[in-house]
Amino acid sequence: MEKSLIKINKWLYPASWLYGAGVWLRNKLFDWGYYKERSFDLPVICVGNITVGGTGKTPHTEYLIKLLQKNFQVAVLSRGYKRKSSGFVLAEEDTPVHQIGDEPYQMKQKFPDIHMAVDADRCHGIEELCKESVAQGTEVVLLDDAFQHRHVKAGLNILLVDYNRMITEDKLLPAGRMREHESGKFRAQVVIITKCPKDMKPMEYRVLTKQINLLAYQQLYFTTLNYGKLRPLFNGGKEYGVGSIHPQVQILLVTGIATPQKLEEDLSKSIRNRIHTLAFSDHHDFTEEDMLSIEQRFNTLPEGKRMIITTEKDAVRMASNKLLPETVKPYIYVLPVEISFLQDQEDSFNQYILDYVRKNSRNSRLP
């Protein structure tokens, strides 16, 4: 097993017990029918987790988009975390990032043919996406990070669990990072253990399967992260494979993600370069002071032998930020990330998803 990223603040256990009681009661009110869940007459797939951030929701959602958009008109609905707008917003080609948030903007730029929308009220958002006058031809809706939004009764729930932060070892907020009790996993039809090492041994698969302890109706999959070629953020130019960077080049890794340690470890395994890390909070809005810190840290590296690497999500916020110094722009490279399935599970997963969508599509219910 790789090093766990779990850190428990035991002195916060009393607050976690109070928080847990509130979450337990809320879920029971849904289970007992006091709070209403709403179903929709088209396939709705929820991708979420029961921990705070960092399980790989965006690359898994993008995997589903690529799988489904060949045959279906896909709509993605997110709350648009940290956006500067309110209500329902349907993204257009020129919709700025601050109107919809960094992850929705990233998905719309990569997949321009999908309907990308944001709305804190998921029921209202799905209603809008089903209107022909708003989002023509929607055939399947992907809900990004809505596992706790139980007012929507998704037809298929996909729960993501970080290999480095197993829910069987974590604790409720604020002592740990869990949004609800581990038993919440039983609402999912599919559980994916994400960010697994590529060289996992058969014994470890068996240990994790036993540890997660799912029910007979639940499907368990394992995925790992793959990093694509580095591309310049500005002005096009040459792309680099991560392993092809000259060993004398020093790297400033700038991140605003939930678990930057995992990315730093992965890069350290792939390259021989010296890596300097400048980590900000998840979805961080870069200020003038932050930009100055980036420029100052970059200037400490040797001239002609330096570069900045950042994530796709961070690149979205950097590219639109007018405070980014011109002196560092030519040196910023974006590291794409995708997921792949382990144990030859890809075909099985793909078929499971496609079967669900076909069986629950509007067309399948027509006489």
Image: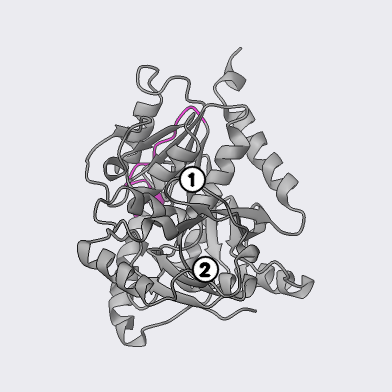
Residue shown at the point (35%, 40%) measured from the top left: 122
**Mark number displayed over residue 249:** none
Quadrant in the picture for residue 24: bottom left
- The quadrant of the rendering that contains the C terminus is top right
Is the stretch drawn in magenta largely helix, strand or loop?
loop
Counting from the top left corner in percent of width and height, residue 111 is at: 50, 36
Quadrant in the picture for residue 289: bottom left
Image color mode: one colour
Residue 63 horizontal side relative to residue 126, left or right: right
- Judging depth in this view, the residue of 249 and 34 nearest the camera is 249
Region rendered in magenta: 29-42
- Report crowding for label 1: few under 14, some 14 to 19, many 20 or more residues within 10 A (C-alpha): few
Q: Mark 1 sits on what residue?
A: 236
Residue 227 lies within the magenta run: no
The residue type indicated by label 1 comes to: Gly
- Asked if residue 159 is positioned above or below residue 268 in the image, the reply reads above
Residue 39 lies within the magenta run: yes
Q: CA distance from mark 1 to mark 2?
A: 24 Å
The residue type indicated by label 2 comes to: Leu
Counting from the top left corner in percent of width and height, residue 329 is at: 37, 56
Counting from the top left corner in percent of width and height, residue 116 is at: 41, 35
Q: Mark 2 sits on what residue?
A: 263
